[in-house]
C-alpha cells in the first residue's frame, strides 16, 4: 500500500523533472554539464516551471515548492548512499487511509530520494539512522514510517536500492525554508558498534 502511495504522489514530479531535461541528462556526467545551461535558459525565458510543480491525484493535491538534485555520493564504512534529490512539498491529502495514519490532512514535508548499497550485508542500517534539521531550527528525528520506504538488513545488498524518505514538518512552512541538513548515522555491526563515520549532507535551496 505504501509503495503504491509513493508511486502515485512522486512519479508525476519525477516525470516532470525528466521532461525538462534532454535525453542525455540520464548520464550523471552529462547532467552536470547541462545543468547550468538549463538554468540559464529558464531565467532567459522567465520560466519557473510552475505547471510542473503542482500535482492533483487520488491521494490529494501536492505542490513541489523547491527541488535540488544530485547532492552527492557518500560512504560510511561499507555503506554507500547517493542522495539523488531533496524536495520541499506542501500538500493536502484526501485519501482516508493516509489521513487516518497521519491524523491530519494538510502537510509540509521534505522528501529525500536515495540510492543505497553496501559491500557488507551483515550490518544494521534502518530509517532510524536518518534525521533531518531545517534552517528554521526544526528537528525531525526519523522519516515517517508510513510514508517512507522500508530499510532493513534483509534488503541491503551491493545493488543500488532506491529508497524515498519523507520527513513531515510540524513547525515549519516549506515556503520559508532555504536550507535543510540530512544527518546519517553510521551503520552498526552485529555487536552494535559503528563501522564508519556519521554523514552530514547540507542542502541549500
Image (cartoon, rainbow, N blue to C red):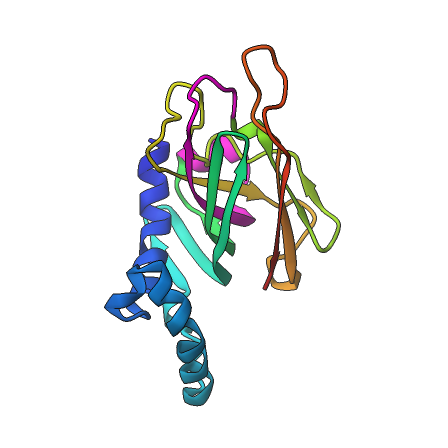
- Farthest left residue in view: 23
Residue at image point 36% right, 62% down:
29
Left/right of residue 197 with respect to residue 38 in the rendered view: right
> What is the x, y in percent for residue 178?
65, 62
Residue at image point 49% right, 29% down:
78
- 22 relative to 176, above or below: below
8 falls in the magenta region? no
- Farthest bottom residue in view: 44
Quadrant housing the C terminus: bottom right
Q: Nearer the viewer, residue 143 or 35?
A: 35
Left/right of residue 100 with respect to residue 4 in the rendered view: right
> What is the x, y in percent for residue 151?
44, 27
The quadrant where residue 3 appears: top left
- 120 relative to 28, above or below: above
- 164 relative to 29, above or below: above
Q: Nearer the viewer, residue 31 or 103?
A: 31
119 falls in the magenta region? yes
Magenta span of residues: 97-125
Amino acid at each position: 500500500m505504501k509503495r503504491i502511495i509513493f508511486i502515485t504522489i512522486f512519479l508525476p514530479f519525477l516525470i516532470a523533472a525528466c521532461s525538462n531535461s534532454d535525453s542525455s541528462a540520464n548520464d550523471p556526467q552529462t547532467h552536470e554539464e547541462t545543468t547550468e545551461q538549463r538554468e540559464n535558459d529558464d531565467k532567459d525565458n522567465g520560466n519557473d516551471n510552475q505547471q510542473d510543480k503542482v500535482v492533483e491525484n487520488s491521494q490529494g493535491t501536492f505542490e513541489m515548492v523547491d527541488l535540488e538534485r544530485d547532492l552527492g555520493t557518500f560512504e560510511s564504512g561499507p555503506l554507500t548512499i547517493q542522495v539523488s534529490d531533496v524536495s520541499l512539498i506542501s500538500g493536502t491529502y484526501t485519501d482516508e487511509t493516509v489521513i487516518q495514519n497521519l491524523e491530519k490532512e494538510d502537510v509540509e514535508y521534505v522528501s529525500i530520494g536515495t540510492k543505497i548499497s553496501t559491500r557488507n550485508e551483515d550490518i544494521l542500517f534502518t530509517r532510524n539512522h536518518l534525521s533531518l534539521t531545517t534552517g528554521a531550527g526544526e528537528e525531525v528525528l526519523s522519516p515517517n514510517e508510513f510514508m517512507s520506504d522500508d530499510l532493513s538488513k534483509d534488503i541491503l545488498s551491493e545493488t543500488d536500492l532506491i529508497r524515498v524518505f519523507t520527513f513531515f514538518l510540524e513547525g515549519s512552512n516549506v515556503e520559508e525554508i532555504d536550507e535543510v541538513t540530512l544527518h546519517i548515522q553510521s551503520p552498526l555491526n552485529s555487536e552494535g558498534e559503528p563501522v564508519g563515520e556519521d554523514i552530514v549532507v547540507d542542502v541549500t535551496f
